[in-house]
Image: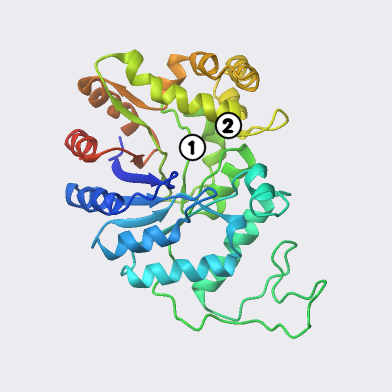
Amino acid sequence: MSTLSLGLQLGYWGALAPGNAHVELAQEAERLGFDSVWTAESWGSDCFTPLAWIGAHTKTIRLGTSVAQLSARTPTACAMATLSIDHLSGGRMTLGLGVSGPQVVEGWYGQPYSKPVTRTREYVDIIRKVLAREAPVTNDGEFYPLPYNGPGAWGMGKPLKSITHPLRADVPIFIGAEGPKNVTQTAEIADGWLPLYYSPYRQDVYADQLTAAKPGFEIAPTVLVNINDDMEQALYPVKAMLGFYIGGMGSAKRNFHKELMARMGYPEEAEAIQKLFFEGKRDEAIAAVPDEFADEISLSGPKDRIKEKLKDWENSPVTSLLINGDINLLRTMAELAI
């Protein structure tokens, strides 16, 4: 049985900036003994700026990106942001990376979504070279050649070493991965994994993909927590989230969330959810999400039931639960898990 830590998942901003609310939540999480706080990005707020702001208003809590999108910045730019926050926070930075999806990469960043697994390996390798600062950084990969000598190059580029000495050469790198090849690679090259959906009752889904993980490898899924004596009401936010991601976050040709749900034992249900969503029947798509699936990837229901379900997570390879909620929920979870 593992000892679970808790992390605060703040995600990305919605239509309105949160003001100081995220700082206040992070400060309370730190006071309660939470291990980490995480920020995200989609196509609005970025993940590094809010994290630096939170870091300036906290003292001990680990700071993580969940996730920084590869296509948002080059690997050297990502390494620069990472080493900067790590210095400013006194060594609290964890870099969480993810490839996002073709809709965002090609529609927002204007880049091709080709070979995401290969691209991730190359990206991580360059970041590690920057942080190690053992030699000027070079790379002969197909995505991020350094120095660049392709079309439009002046031919004057030379390998460079970071002016600033990183505080730590071994800043932890986590990867948000869903597909089997990406999860397998994550276990090989990263210090941790950020699953989108994880079920402690279906550990076999990922067991073979995690065999290469080194000792100390962390697994930190984002888990929705809904405390409510009415199970139907407790599960509804989880089903709404799943209905949107499985139904609409992707195309009819490829939807990684739908494919993951199918691998977790619900192929027909995943197909039905997407079909209903594309037909504009969003309420029906949400209703089509099986209660069992929503329940096993979340912590939903009465407080005592959640306390019991935490034991199932402790008996899994998961090392930390990343949760989102108001101060009252953070306090309740600290009482139950910490």
Residue 285 in the image: above or below residue 207:
above
Residue 116 at least partly seen: no
Residue reaching furthest to the right: 151
* Residue beneath the point at 51% across and 28% down: 204
Q: Estimate how packed mark 2 is, as few (under 14), some (14 to 19) or many (20 or more) residues with alpha carbons within 10 Å.
A: many
The amino acid beneath tag 2 is: His
Residue 188 in the image: above or below residue 283:
below
- Is residue 212 shown left or right of residue 327? right
Query: Residues under labels 2 and 1: Cα distance?
Result: 9 Å
Using the rendered view, name the quadrant where residue 123 is placed. Answer: bottom right
Q: Estimate how packed mark 1 is, as few (under 14), some (14 to 19) or many (20 or more) residues with alpha carbons within 10 Å.
A: some
Residue 75 spot, x, y in % from top left: 59, 65
Q: Are marks 2 and 1 in contact (CB under 8 Å)?
A: yes
Could you say which is closer to the camera, residue 47 or residue 187?
Answer: 47
Residue 263 at least partly seen: yes
Residue 271 spot, x, y in % from top left: 64, 18
- Is residue 49 shown left or right of residue 284? left
Residue 301 spot, x, y in % from top left: 29, 20
User: Which quadrant: the N terminus?
Assistant: top left
- Is residue 115 shown left or right of residue 125? right
The amino acid beneath tag 1 is: Leu
Could you say which is closer to the camera, residue 128 or residue 215?
Answer: 128
* Residue beneath the point at 65% across and 81% down: 159
Using the rendered view, name the quadrant where residue 110 is placed. Answer: bottom right
Can you identify the residue that label 2 sits on?
257
Residue 243 spot, x, y in % from top left: 52, 24
* Residue beneath the point at 69% across and 33% down: 254
Disc ID at residue 196: 1
